[in-house]
Image (tube, helix red, strand yellow):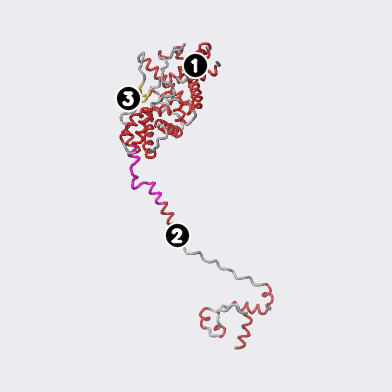
Amino acid sequence: MNWVVALPLGQRLPVGKPMTHKREAGRVEDDVDLMLRVKAGEAEAFNQLMEKYQRTVVNLVFRFTGDAENAEDLAQEVFLRIYRAAPRYEPKAKFFTYLYQVTLNLCRNERERSGRRKTSSLDSRTENDRQWDVPDPEGGAEALVQRQETATQVQAAILELPQEQRQLLVLQRFQDLGYEELAEVTSQTVSAVKAKLHRARLALKKKLEPLLGKERDQ
Amino acid sequence: MKCNQAQEWMSEKLDHALDAQRDLQLERHLHDCAQCQSEWIALSQSWELLGSLPELSPSPLFRAQVWEKIRHDQAPAPLWSLKRWLSGLGLSLAGLMLCFRLTAPPPLATPTLPPPTPAVATQSLAASELQEWDASVEVMPGLDSVAQDDSPLASLPLGDLSHDYFAMDEKLEEF
């Protein structure tokens, strides 16, 4: 008997692919091939890499740092560093592993430099601010406002987590990485990743308890 | 199945990483344990909330801005910059200091003091001779008078200054 969890807004848990084979072999080889072409001096190959990963990197940076205003600037810095290191690039690991490691290092350095966490409330948006892709607003404007408020609280809860837990949650939830890939990106063993991911989820659940209680009441 | 084990498997169930047998065991436990069922609901709801975070869309100028940063990164350094000027000044000063040390005249040799007069030689001089010697010291001949002095004493060779002064008296008597 399968348990169907009644989630907020009538959504169900998505039935996804198993954790072990998240990336297609062809896709991985394309990235390495593109990067090798960048190493050879091909600008168009770098354009293709940016086209493929710019959204991913921008959102990774945003979720790691909580800084929506500077997320794009930091994401550009990630690509700048990759381009700068292209002459020395060796395909020892998958390209997205390399990309995520550069992104994580940059975000870590940025947080140490800024010294404090910044959150950007969705309510403070103006026309010139970053364009948010908010999920389909079922239920009209009121539901949209509620979603925005919920998102702000969830983002704040993530930023309160220790950096290592935050990295694992964000990489697994938004990049759909398997345990092996997570282990490779974070330089840990698979068993360590499993245990830390579980602790990270428990910590997140604890921080979101007020929100979960409100959702259950509704 | 114990609750601790069930809660660990919940995380893997969220990742769809449980095999069929373990998945079935967990579901049976959730059916029987209200606490674990509540825990599972909370865990899956928080996971879903995390996934509901909105995304940012990169601006259309993202790639162009990256290329601009690359161009700026690879641009040659300006001919003049404060940093370069200061480092050049520092090197120049260091070079000047080094040249100064190499071309400076050698330090003057410190004069060596004459060996102390042995106490025995001093004590052997008669008191009258000492007085005579002291009196003669007070009258220091000028350089001109010394140059014009044709006396035998003045014409004595100066090479050997280690001779006995009192033995000179005998030589003078010979003259």
Q: Which residue is mark 3?
A: A127
Q: Which residue is mark 2?
A: B100
Residue A35 to residue A215: above or below: below
Q: Amino acid at mark 1?
A: Gln
Q: Amino acid at mark 2?
A: Phe
Q: Residue at x 57, y 68 (%)?
A: B112
Judging from the image, mark 1 belongs to the subunit labelled B
Q: Callout 3 environment at 10 Å: few (<14), some (14 to 19), or many (20+)?
A: few
What number of labels is visible?
A: 3
Rendering coords of residue B135 (x, y %): 62, 78
Q: Residue A159 is drawn in which quadrant?
A: top left
Q: Residue B121 is drawn in which quadrant?
A: bottom right
Alpha carbon separation for disc pair 3 and 2 = 67 Å
Alpha carbon separation for disc pair 3 and 1 = 53 Å
Rendering coords of residue A127 (x, y %): 32, 25
Rendering coords of residue A112 (x, y %): 46, 33
Between circles 3 and 1, the one closer to the viewer is 1
Q: Amino acid at mark 3?
A: Glu
Q: Which residues are magenta?
A: B69-89
Q: Which residue is mark 1?
A: B21
